[in-house]
Image (spheres, rainbow, N blue to C red):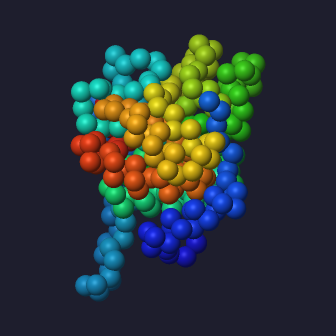
Amino acid sequence: MTFLDRRSVLRAATSAAAAGALASGCAPGRTGSPAVRVSTPPHTGGPGAPRPAPVYAARPPTRVPDGPVQIEHGPRDGRAVALTFHGRGDPRLATALLREAERAGARVTVLAVGDWLDERPEMARRILDGGHELGNHTMHHRNVCALPEDAAYAEISRCADRLRRLTGSIGSWFRPSRARRATDLVTRLAHRAGYPHVLSYDLDSLDSTDPGAAAVRRTVLDGVGPGSVVSLHLGHAGTVAALPPILDGLRRRGLRAVTTTELVT
């Protein structure tokens, strides 16, 4: 996609929503940042040339000492929230959303679907290189909590394998697909695959129903508070358009959007 300024990105996102070009959504020690800055390539251009971006490596699964097995929110006495995105859909919309977050100095958590990573492996690197966090949202986005044990474990472990191959890590978090909370079985299977915790959320933006950018913004800002973990989706144009006013609304309340790892550790 050619470079678009912020206004053009939002116009393109709104047009895509009107045309119905949307991806399917879901049913209802301190680490600081999601990735380790490994190196910054040397600056070889002239004085006006842009500096190359730093290179990031994926973090291992996050462990919260004394934290619950299923994490729904972070500390309520802080000033941070986590915007978490179900990772699937048009990579142009995903890239536009990441760019909006980065422009505002925000960092997000993307729980990627494995077959999306198979189709768009470059997105794993794009997410991490933007300073964001990457996790596991199952291989095919099936109703993992309704599957037999072997099939459910395959959904978790195969996505973990994709993440390991692309980034060197199975990702910071596991979130069940098509479920807000994992069953006891899925929680045990996630632990077997290497995830100490299951990531849930306490605020559903309902953006996967495509209610429009204004409705997504209202739902998030009406329900958000310190420590919130918000469920959102990549691949929905209304979400791209809603993100800048959401981030502005958070800032006005003295809240900042951070990765889930930064929120809870």
Q: Is residue 25 above or below residue 72?
A: below
Q: Is residue 249 above or below residue 27?
A: below
Residue 208, quarter of picture: top right
Q: Position of residue 256 (x, y in %)?
A: 30, 44
Q: Position of residue 140 (x, y in %)?
A: 71, 39
> The C terminus is located in which quarter?
top left
Q: Is residue 219 left or right of residue 193?
A: left
Please say whether residue 42 is visible from this viewpoint: yes
Q: Tell me the residue at 45%/27% (across/down).
A: 202
Q: What is the count of numbered marks?
A: 0
Q: Tell me the residue at 62%/65% (across/down).
A: 15
Residue 74, quarter of picture: top left
Q: Position of residue 41 (x, y in %)?
A: 35, 68
Q: Nearer the viewer, residue 29 or 199?
A: 199
Q: Position of residue 184 (x, y in %)?
A: 59, 13
Q: Tell me the residue at 71%/28% (across/down).
A: 143
> The N terminus is located in which quarter?
bottom right
Q: Farthest top residue?
A: 184
Please say whether residue 35 is visible from this viewpoint: no
Q: Nearer the viewer, residue 95 or 133?
A: 95
Residue 122, quarter of picture: bottom right
Q: Tell me the residue at 46%/46% (across/down).
A: 217
Q: Is residue 38 left or right of residue 167?
A: left
Q: Is residue 42 left or right of residue 108?
A: left
